[in-house]
Amino acid sequence: SPFFSGARSDEGKRRKPRFCKCCSLWCCCIGTTVTLVVGIVVFALTVWIGSDMEWRAVVAKGNTKNFYTMDEVCAAPAGSNNYTTYNNVEAAHANDGLVRHCGDCGDCSTARDIDILDVTKNSLTKTATRCAVQKFFGGRAAVERCFDSDVGFTPPCTTCWVDNVMCTQNACVFNCLRSLILRESNNAESGELNRCLECDEKMCGPAFILCAGANRRRSGIVSDIGRDNLAEVCKKVDEDWAVGVETG
């Protein structure tokens, strides 16, 4: 019939090949490129706006120097790991205690933990940052595993550090992303902490100190983070406190 013959005739027609009007890589990938650029811009704006909002809370917080200027000290008898908080250095010495750090004792006041703080004084910040990133891939458990394998604190001390990581990622995530994007060093030329460290110090530092007791500054250890050494680094530590104390 004419209908079917016409259909066959149409089917038999050779279709003309379609050619790309623009065969350059840029032209063919422009949609993907634009999407990627827009995504980067949106991400950057989110980080900057978020960091500014977080920073308002940081500015409203007072400094933490009171944790490094108190009279209390943590001390233990020579060769012993039985540490106790004393009201001052004199009280510690009167009870045959050797001062191991300024401030109250806590879960990181063991000889092992303070020894690790000293040995890793120039690398612990980077290691802790690397462990903190593990939260995005495996949650809190992954952070704990990282500290166990790469640092080696006692379990109670590790808990204090992991709690601090969780706090920092809740209160300072945008400021830490900003510092990471800008590749900021720990301290600016003026000596001020970068925004990530400053946020962590003010928003999470107090709870961490109450849990840990000992950190590097309280233990008289100068680290890879620039601090006010005169006001914040403990000068009351007895140099020979660790002699004969088991650190394994």
Image (cartoon, rainbow, N blue to C red):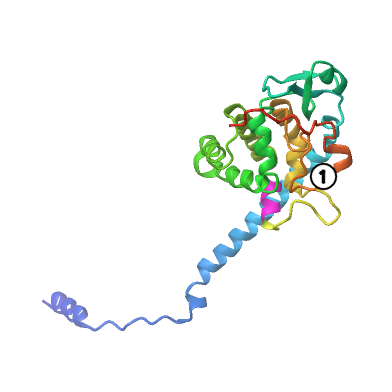
Q: Residues within 10 Å of mark 1 (few under 14, many from 20)?
A: some
Q: How many marks?
A: 1
**Left or right of 189, for residue 212:** left
Along the viewing direction, whichever of 191 and 116 lies nearer the viewer? 116
What residue sits right under mark 1 in the picture? Answer: 227
| Any part of residue 173 in sight | no
> Visible in this render: residue 37?
yes
> What secondary structure is found at the residue carrying circle 1?
loop
Return the residue found at the far left.
Answer: 1
x, y percent for residue 219: 76, 34
Q: Decide which of 58, 229 is in the foreground and name it.
A: 229
Q: At 64% from the left edge and 37% from the top edge, which residue is drawn?
A: 165
User: Looking at the picture, which amino acid does disc 1 mark?
Assistant: Arg
Residue drawn at point x = 45 percent, y = 81 percent: 23
Q: Is residue 149 left or right of residue 204?
A: left
For the residue pair 148 and 41, the one nearer the viewer reads as 148
The residue located at (67%, 30%) in the rendering is 111
Magenta residues, as a range? Answer: 172-180
Percent coordinates x, y for residue 4 in the rendering: 14, 75
- Residue 154, by quadrant, is top right
Task: Identify the image quadrant of the N terminus.
Answer: bottom left
In the displayed structure, 108 sits above or below 41; it is: above
Q: In the rendering, at what x and y percent does residue 82 appear?
A: 68, 19
In the image, farthest residue toward the top: 95
Left or right position of 172 against 190:
left
Task: Residue 144: give x, y in percent of width and height.
Answer: 55, 35
